[in-house]
Image (cartoon, grey):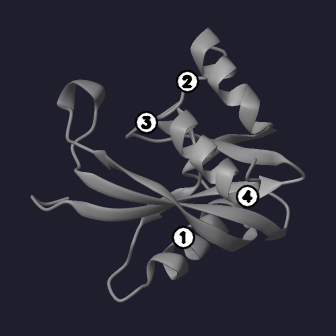
Amino acid sequence: MGERPQLAVSAVIFHNGQVLLVRRAREPGRGLYSVPGGRVEHGETLHEAVAREVREETALSIGIAGFAGWREVLPDPAAGRAGHYLVISFAAQWRGGTVNLNAELDEFRWIFPDTLPILARTGEIATTQGLPDIVDAARRLINPR
């Protein structure tokens, strides 16, 4: 991983009013629900990277609606995190395909965004840090109230 921060992207994907959550099958974050994403490759734009990561992880095609926010993930050996990441998150719309997870993920759920804080708070699902906030920011871009 090296000593430098890594740039990563993620997509909060909406379809029929619901958002796609995926569960990580590997460390870091094994067993935690998040949204599809991963590292940006050299020479790749952020939009290219997020579309590629979504395609690789879920087999879906998306349309990017806009910037939903960012978060910084710092190394935390106690939590099994060795890397330092800056994750740029986008709100996106499902454009086509059926979810077909790659080996990095082991489960998916389509849920209504308003239920995520409840599911996380009650412990029904464990999520990556800040996920409810990013999903809410993305929802406001997709469906401003």
* Of the image marks 4 and 2, the number of the one nearer the N terminus: 2
In this rendering, the label closer to the viewer, 4 or 3: 4
Circle 2 crowding by C-alpha within 10 Å: few under 14, some 14–19, many from 20: some
Q: Position of residue 116 (x, y in %)?
A: 67, 29
Q: Amino acid at mark 1?
A: Val
Query: Camera-side residue: 112 or 105?
Result: 112
Q: Amino acid at mark 4?
A: Ile
* Of the image marks 3 and 1, the number of the one nearer the N terminus: 3
Quarter residue 43 falls in: bottom left
Q: Position of residue 82 (x, y in %)?
A: 21, 43
Q: Residue 105 shows which numbered tag?
A: none
User: Is 55 drawn above or below residue 142 in the view shown?
Assistant: below
- The answer for how far apart the CA atoms under marks 2 and 1 are is 23 Å
Q: Which residue is mark 2?
A: 126
Circle 3 crowding by C-alpha within 10 Å: few under 14, some 14–19, many from 20: some
Q: Which residue is mark 3?
A: 29
**Identity of the residue drawn at 53% across and 45% down:** 134
In this rendering, the label closer to the viewer, 4 or 2: 4
Q: Which residue is mark 1?
A: 50
Secondary structure, mark 1, is: helix
Residue extending farthest to the front is 145
Q: Amino acid at mark 3?
A: Gly
Circle 1 crowding by C-alpha within 10 Å: few under 14, some 14–19, many from 20: many
In this rendering, the label closer to the viewer, 2 or 3: 2
Label 2–label 1 contact, CB within 8 A: no
* Of the image marks 2 and 1, the number of the one nearer the N terminus: 1
Q: Which residue is mark 4?
A: 142
